[in-house]
Image (cartoon, rainbow, N blue to C red):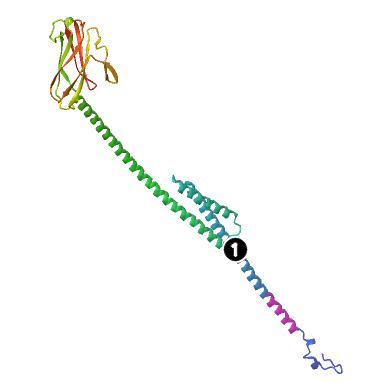
């Protein structure tokens, strides 16, 4: 259908935008779509980055927690190790207590720590390592001391055995020496033999009846003995009457025998030169009675001879 309206020419309006709006509207829509896509990609990337960072932080926290637990377990073992370490050395024991206190202090710090990072983990690991190294040093010292103590105990036992053996040998030697000394002493004692008792009158002539005697004479022989020390010897004579009394003078002289004073009848000093020596000792008195007389001779605190003699 042709428009035959006068004055109208359709060709004049062919390039007018007013009558052709579609191309510009399509470009705007495409632009918005591109922006939306770009924003979506950015959002997806940011989301992925966020979740990646969050996941990494979670992993890092888990690793830090695992490291913290590991350090705490190491400290716990160190505490037990220090508690099990014992030493009789006072200085070493005091040092062990100091290091045990350092372990306790580090454990307290560890439990109170709230902000964890790799640097702190390394710091704690370093301190734990130092404490462990110190503890190994103490273990080595204690082992060395225990080994030394065992050696000393073994040596002490050996020395005690040697000392005991030496003491036994010394005791045996002392006993033998004492026995030998006793034998020498016993062998060195003077001995009187051939003891005789004779009744004499005032002229020193023998009488047959003791009641008629004015004196008694005891004759004997000091036997030769090379073990006896030669020189002046005091010989004491005791004459015991038949009625059991010791015949003595009015002065009643005594000598010491076995720590006690002992009365005697007469005494004589002789020069003894390790050879047989005949000796006679006189006792002056009267009123003798018949019967058995006991004659005893003493020298240097010992009884050197005795005899029982019957007088008529």
Q: Quickly name the residue at label 1.
A: 57
User: Which quadrant would the C terminus be assigned to in this image?
Assistant: top left
Queried whether the magenta region covers residue 24, the answer comes back as: yes
Q: Position of residue 203 (x, y in %)?
A: 14, 9
At a point 59% along the width and 63% down the height, the residue shown is 57
Give neighbour class at mark 1: few <14, some 14-19, many 20+ (Cα, 10 Å).
few
Above or below residue 216? Residue 224 is below
Q: Position of residue 156 (x, y in %)?
A: 34, 41
Query: Quadrant of the rendered structure where residue 193 is?
Result: top left
User: Magenta part of the protein: which range?
Assistant: 22-36
Q: With 307 as the anchor, is 166 left or right in this view?
A: right
At a point 24% along the width and 29% down the height, the residue shown is 178
Q: With 70 as the anchor, is 216 left or right in this view?
A: left
Q: Is residue 85 in view? A: no
Q: Position of residue 55 (x, y in %)?
A: 59, 63
The secondary structure making up most of the magenta span is helix
Query: Quadrant of the rendered structure where residue 305 is?
Result: top left
Specify the farthest residue to the front: 203
Task: Give the secondary structure at mark 1.
Answer: helix
Specify the farthest residue to the right: 6
Queried whether the magenta region covers residue 196, the answer comes back as: no
At a point 21% along the width and 26% down the height, the residue shown is 185
Residue closer to the observer: 200 or 127: 200
Above or below residue 9? Residue 142 is above
Q: With 297 as the anchor, is 73 left or right in this view?
A: right
Query: Quadrant of the rendered structure where residue 218 is?
Result: top left
Q: Is residue 215 in view? A: yes
User: Which quadrant would the N terminus be assigned to in this image?
Assistant: bottom right
Q: With 76 as the anchor, is 20 left or right in this view?
A: right
Q: Position of residue 213 (x, y in %)?
A: 17, 7
Residue closer to the observer: 173 or 188: 188
Residue closer to the observer: 29 or 59: 59
């Amino acid at each position: 259908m042709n428009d035959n309206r006068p004055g109208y020419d359709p060709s004049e309006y062919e390039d007018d935008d007013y009558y052709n709006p579609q191309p510009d509207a399509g470009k705007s829509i495409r632009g918005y779509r591109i922006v939306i896509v770009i924003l979506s990609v950015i959002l997806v990337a940011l989301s992925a980055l966020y979740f990646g960072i969050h996941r990494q932080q979670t992993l890092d926290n888990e690793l830090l927690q695992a490291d913290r637990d590991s350090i705490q377990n190491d400290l716990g073992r160190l505490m037990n190790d220090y508690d099990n370490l014992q030493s009789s050395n006072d200085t070493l024991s005091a040092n062990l207590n100091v290091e045990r206190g350092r372990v306790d202090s580090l454990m307290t710090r560890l439990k109170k720590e709230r902000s964890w990072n790799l640097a702190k983990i390394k710091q704690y690991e370093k301190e734990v390592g130092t404490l462990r190294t110190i503890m190994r040093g103490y273990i080595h010292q204690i082992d060395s001391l225990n080994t030394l103590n065992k050696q000393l105990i073994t040596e002490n036992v050996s020395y005690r055995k040697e000392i005991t053996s030496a003491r036994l040998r010394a005791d045996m030697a002392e006993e033998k020496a004492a026995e030998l000394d006793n034998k020498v002493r016993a062998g060195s004692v003077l001995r009187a033999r051939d003891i005789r008792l004779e009744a004499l009158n005032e002229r020193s002539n023998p009488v047959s009846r003791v009641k008629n005697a004015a004196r008694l004479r005891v004759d004997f022989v000091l036997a030769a003995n090379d073990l006896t020390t030669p020189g002046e010897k005091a010989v004491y004579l005791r004459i015991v009457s038949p009625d059991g009394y010791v015949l003595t003078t009015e002065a009643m002289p005594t000598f010491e025998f076995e720590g006690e004073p002992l009365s005697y009848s007469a005494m004589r000093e002789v020069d003894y030169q390790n050879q047989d020596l005949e000796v006679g000792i006189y006792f002056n008195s009267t009123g003798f009675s018949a019967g058995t007389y006991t004659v005893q001779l003493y020298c240097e605190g010992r009884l050197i001879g005795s005899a029982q003699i019957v007088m008529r």
